[in-house]
């Protein structure tokens, strides 16, 4: 597998951020998921007046890829409007751990700072299908 085009993926995450629906927090996040087939799926965070219904940008992008039938995410870029690059929330870490298990995660801010991490960096000792299988 050739190295993902992180410049293109970062640009896609920025574009996705422009589609965020965040009228409550005003914290606009963008994510872009690159699949093994070379397609890029965008996600902005989508909030709701019933706050817990909110879905983060990462999950919108990953679920969009899965909804399109994709199963292998090779890279995920996430851009947040923070001084330092921000890490995904706990719920997204769990989703990344299972649905984008072998991807590289590029965390970015608007100033261009970036950090490349793995799902294992984000969620060491994560719970997954293996634990369910061990009980059978
Ligand atoms: N949010 C994301 O979309 N991704 C993150 O990594 C952190 C938080 C969203 C959820 C909510 O809409 C807003 O940012 C504030 O928490």
Image (cartoon, rainbow, N blue to C red):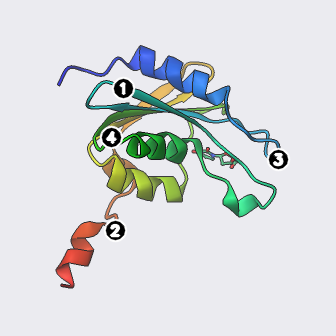
Q: What is the secondary structure assignment of the residue under circle 4?
A: loop
Counting from the top left corner in percent of width and height, residue 11 is at 52, 17
Q: Could you give the CA–CA distance between mark 1 and mark 3, rounded to whole angstroms?
A: 31 Å
Eye-nearest disc, 2 or 4: 4
Residue tagged 1: 39
Pick whichever of labels 4 and 3 is earlier in the sequence. Answer: 3
Pick whichever of labels 1 and 2 is earlier in the sequence. Answer: 1
- Ligand 1 is within 8 Å of the C-beta of the residue at disc 4: no
Q: What is the secondary structure assignment of the residue under circle 1?
A: loop
Pick whichever of labels 1 and 4 is earlier in the sequence. Answer: 1
Residue tagged 3: 24
Q: Could you give the CA–CA distance between mark 3 and mark 2, rounded to whole angstroms?
A: 31 Å
Above or below for 42 versus 113 = below
Q: What is the secondary structure assignment of the residue under circle 3?
A: loop
Q: What is the secondary structure assignment of the residue under circle 2?
A: loop
Q: In which quarter of the image is residue 20?
A: top right
Q: Could you give the CA–CA distance between mark 2 and mark 4, rounded to whole angstroms?
A: 22 Å
Total numbered labels: 4
Crowding at mark 2 (Cα within 10 Å: few <14, some 14-19, many 20+): few
Crowding at mark 1 (Cα within 10 Å: few <14, some 14-19, many 20+): few
Q: Do the residues labelled 1 and 4 touch (CB within 8 Å)?
A: yes
Q: In which quarter of the image is residue 82?
A: top right
Crowding at mark 3 (Cα within 10 Å: few <14, some 14-19, many 20+): few
Residue tagged 4: 70
- Ligand 1 is within 8 Å of the C-beta of the residue at disc 3: yes
Pick whichever of labels 1 and 3 is earlier in the sequence. Answer: 3
Give me the disc on residue 127. 2
Q: Could you give the CA–CA distance between mark 4 and mark 3, rounded to whole angstroms?
A: 31 Å
Q: Which of 113 and 46 is in front in this view?
A: 46
Pick whichever of labels 2 and 4 is earlier in the sequence. Answer: 4
Pick whichever of labels 3 and 2 is earlier in the sequence. Answer: 3
Counting from the top left corner in percent of width and height, residue 70 is at 32, 40
């Amino acid at each position: 597998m050739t190295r993902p085009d992180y410049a293109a993926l970062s640009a896609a995450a920025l574009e996705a951020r422009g589609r965020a629906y965040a009228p409550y927090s005003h914290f606009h996040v963008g994510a872009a998921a690159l699949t093994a087939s070379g397609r890029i799926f965008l996600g902005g965070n989508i909030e709701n007046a019933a706050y817990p219904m909110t879905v983060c940008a990462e999950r919108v992008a990953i679920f969009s890829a899965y909804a399109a039938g994709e199963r292998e995410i090779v890279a995920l870029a996430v851009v947040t409007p923070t001084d330092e690059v921000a890490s995904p929330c706990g719920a997204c870490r769990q989703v990344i751990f299972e649905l984008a298990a072998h991807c590289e995660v590029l965390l970015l801010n608007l100033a261009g700072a970036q950090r490349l991490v793995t799902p294992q960096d984000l969620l060491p000792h994560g719970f997954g299908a293996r634990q369910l299988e061990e009980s059978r």
